[in-house]
Image: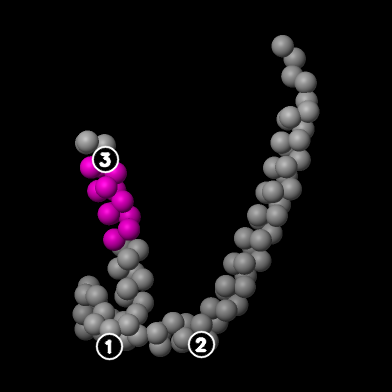
Amino acid sequence: VFSHGMLILWAIMVVLPLFWAVMSSFKTDADIFNTPWSLPDSLNFDSWGRAWSQAHMSEYFLNTILVVGGSLTGTLVLGSMAAYVLARFEFPG
């Protein structure tokens, strides 16, 4: 029971800041400066559009996709080759 309680407490400590950050991204600029710790009254998607267009988030997103795709491909190829060798190799003893 104690371990479950600690896991629930840990999950709340991890999820709550993420939830707050996502919800704060829907605030207007005035809301961020006037009430930084509160949740938004209504969802405002303008800041998401500005981040995508003015801050060039599309370029950063494409870079992330390329890096993750290359890393994933390399890991799969090398992992498959290592698994094949380890499965076929006769270990002494």
In the rendered image, residue 80, in percent from the top left (x then y), is placed at 73, 42
Q: Is residue 60 above or below residue 11?
A: below
Q: Residues within 10 Å of mark 2 (few under 14, many from 20)?
A: few
The tag on residue 30 is 1
Disc 2 marks which amino acid?
A: Gln
Kindly report the secondary structure that dominates the magenta region of the rendered protein. helix
In the rendered image, residue 39, in percent from the top left (x then y), is placed at 24, 75
Q: Which residue is mark 3?
A: 4
Q: Is residue 84 above or below residue 70?
A: above
Q: Is residue 8 above or below residue 44?
A: above
Mark whose residue sits in front, 3 or 1: 3
Cβ atoms at labels 2 and 3 below 8 Å apart: no
Q: Quadrant of residue 62?
A: bottom right
Asked if residue 45 lies left or right of residue 16, the reply is right
Disc 3 marks which amino acid?
A: His
For marks 2 and 3 on the same chain, the one whose residue lies earlier in the sequence: 3
Over which residues does the magenta segment extend?
5-16
Disc 1 marks which amino acid?
A: Ala
In the rendered image, residue 37, in percent from the top left (x then y), is placed at 22, 73
Q: Which residue is mark 2?
A: 54
Q: Is residue 32 above or below residue 8?
A: below
